[in-house]
Structure formats: structure tokens, C-alpha cells
Amino acid sequence: MGGVFGRFRAWGRRHPGIVSALWLAPFVGLCLLFLGLYASMPGFAGGAPFWWYAVLGVVLVVPLFWRRRRPREVFAAVSGISFVQWCLGVEPTPFNLAVLVAMYAVASLCSVRWAVAAGLAAELGLALAFGRITENPDFETWASTSVFVVAIWIAGIYANTRQRYLEGLEERAERAERERDQQARLAAAEERARIARELHDVVAHNVSVMIVQADGAAYAIDGDPEQARQAVRAISATGRRALAEMRRMVGVLRADGGETEDYAPQPGLAELDDLVARVRLSGLPVEFRVTGDPVELPEGEELTVYRIVQEALTNTIKHGGPGSAASVELEYGPRELVVRVRDDGRGAAARQRPGGHGLVGMRERAAVFGGTVQAGPRQGGGFGVVARLPVGEPGADRAA
């Protein structure tokens, strides 16, 4: 049964106009019924033609179809028409009950001050109409009749309060759901950070063991070959355990929900030529040159250089504008590798898009190896990225 009412309420929210007309239909039918009964009475309404009252009824009822969208305007129109009717000396008809329907709409949809104003206006209209249709009006009779008006007004206030209460409950439920999702994301991020720390500890421990075993094997390889073989076996077993643990933890850190990807080697300096070629095919002229004596870099540092160049060229394609060109230079020095990516595009005039993290990612990648990244508009136009990475030092020493 609850599901049926729930579907009915949902249907009502989607079709408010139809629901409003259905609620108004019984009122219109009763008014027509009573109007027909009153019209059959002798001397009804001073002998005015029946069609005149039918027109009056249409004028009073039709605005009620907009009572939910514009309750105050509808109440003002209906009460104003009724007041003009009173001023012209036209007797009240059942259609004048439209004032109470409009009053209920104001009380149930508007603020308290508007509800009070509508209630007082309805009571004033009742007093005016009561004073005309009764020959000897008295306060007790008027008060007993006013109870009906007050009951409708209170019902509207109750409906308004209940609607605000339900809206407050929905808002609190939505806020609680958002906070729950946020807490879940924070907990997941905290758990990932913990796993990352554990991964660092696992790798550091196993690599330390492998280094000790390798040093022992190198020391015993001539004097005690058997001990050297045992050390090599220990290195192999430790490496396998470390690799398995890393794969397990990295699998937990994945955010793609368990999608499998093919294992492929990460790009390095050897793939820069292919990167530049792909960028040229996209329509951006790129000049690539290498100066100095190239030295061998760790794979992680080569990947960092590749990603910095890739991100810088991507930014040039996005923000450089039409007709821009870029240059990529790798300068090997005795102590550092300098990566320069420059373009002659818009530079400082380029539109900044919120939410970008490319430059931050460059700096974080370079900082892992003790390097720095400087990026910004160039004098005379264009944009430049300069990364400096140390070379010729063991990666373990830099990490320390």
C-alpha cells in the first residue's frame, strides 16, 4: 500500500497542474449544484438573470487553477472580485467560497504574515457578506460562522508547517548522505596513504636485505662459492617476495575498480623522439635537440623527464593558440640535466582554466629526485618550462 501511495505522490509531483484540477473539481461540482438549487428559489438574487451569475462563477473559479503558482495574486483577484460584487449589491453565491480556497492556498504556500493577512481579509469579507444577507446580525452568529473560516485557515497553516518540516528532513537527509560519502572518500584516501607507507616500508626493507646479501655474495664469491650461491638465492627469493607484495598493494591502490591493464614498460628518454613526432602530427611544430654528453639515468628519472616534456607540450597545444611553435632542449651538464620546453604562443594572455594540476605534477615529479621546475610566461611572448634534475648521483642517495 505504501508503494502505491509513493507512486501516486511521485506522479503528482510530475503533473502538479492535473492534481490541482482534480482537487478543484469537487468544489466546482458542489458550487454548480447549490447554484442550481438557489436559482430555482423565488426571488433569488433580486431577479437577476441566471447567466449573469454563471459568468460571475467562471470569473471567481478560473483563477483558482493558478493558486499554487501565484497564491497571493489569485487571492487578491478573487477577494477583489467578491468585494466589487458586494459594492454592487449582488447577493453572495456558492462561488464566493473561492475566497476560502484561495485563502487556504496562501496559508499553505506563503509566509506567516501573508497567511495572517489573507485570514483577516477573509474574515472581513465574511462580516460584510453576513451583514448584508441577515436582517438582524448578531456577534454570536457571526462568530459561529467564522469558525469554519478559521478551521480552513488553520488547516493551511498546518499544511505549510508540515511541508517545511518534510523539506527540512529531506535537506538533512541529503546533507547526511553527502557527509557520509565525503567521510567514505576521506577514509579511503587515508587507507591508501597508509598502504603507500606500508609499501615504502616493504620495499625499503627488502631492498636493504638484497643489498646486504649482494655484498655478502660479492665478498664470498671467491673464497666460499657455496655461501655466495646461497646469498644469490636469498636475493632472488627476497626480490620475488618484494615484487609480489608490491603488486598486491598497488592493486589495492588502483582506483579503476579492478580493470586489468597490460603490463608495458614505462616511457623514457628513448621515447622522446616518438612523443615529438606525435605532437608534430597534431599540427604543432616542435624543434628537439640534445646538448652535452648524455649520461645514463635511472628509469624513474627518465620517466620524470618524459612526463615533464609531455605535459609542457600538452599545455602548448591547449593554450598556445593557432600558429604557435615549441622547442624541446635537453642540456646535460656535469651535475644536472636541464630540460627546457618553450613556445611562442599566447603566454600570459592565455586563458587560465580552473582545476588544472599539470604544473603541480611536474614539480612533484621533479622533487622526488631532488630537482626543481620553473614555469611561467616568457618575456616577449610565449610560455616556458625549465626543469633541473641532478645527475651522476645514486638514486638511493637522492632518495635519502
Image (cartoon, grey):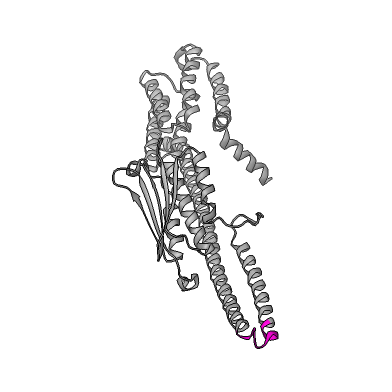
Can you say whether 56 is above or below 269 in the image?
A: above
Which quarter of the image is occupied by the N terminus? top right
Q: Is residue 30 visible?
A: yes
Can you say whether 22 is above or below 274 in the image?
A: above
Taking 266 as reference, is 67 left or right? left
* Magenta region, residue range: 219-228
Q: Is residue 342 magenta?
A: no
- Outermost residue toward the left? 379
Q: Main secondary structure of the magenta part?
A: helix
- Outermost residue toward the bottom? 223
- In-front residue for pair 397/103: 397
- In-front residue for pair 133/115: 115
Residue 236 % position (x, y): 67, 75
- In-front residue for pair 29/363: 363
Q: In the rendered image, which quarter is residue 208 located in?
A: bottom right
Residue 137 % position (x, y): 39, 31
Can you say whether 370 is above or below 171 in the image?
A: below
How many labels, in total? 0
Residue 47 % position (x, y): 47, 12
- In-front residue for pair 139/149: 149
Q: Is residue 145 visible?
A: no
Q: Give the residue drawn at x 32%, y 44%.
A: 348
Residue 310 % position (x, y): 48, 50
Q: In the rendered image, which quarter is residue 220 located in?
A: bottom right
Q: Give the residue drawn at x 40%, y 20%.
A: 85
Q: In the rendered image, which quarter is residue 13 located in?
A: top right
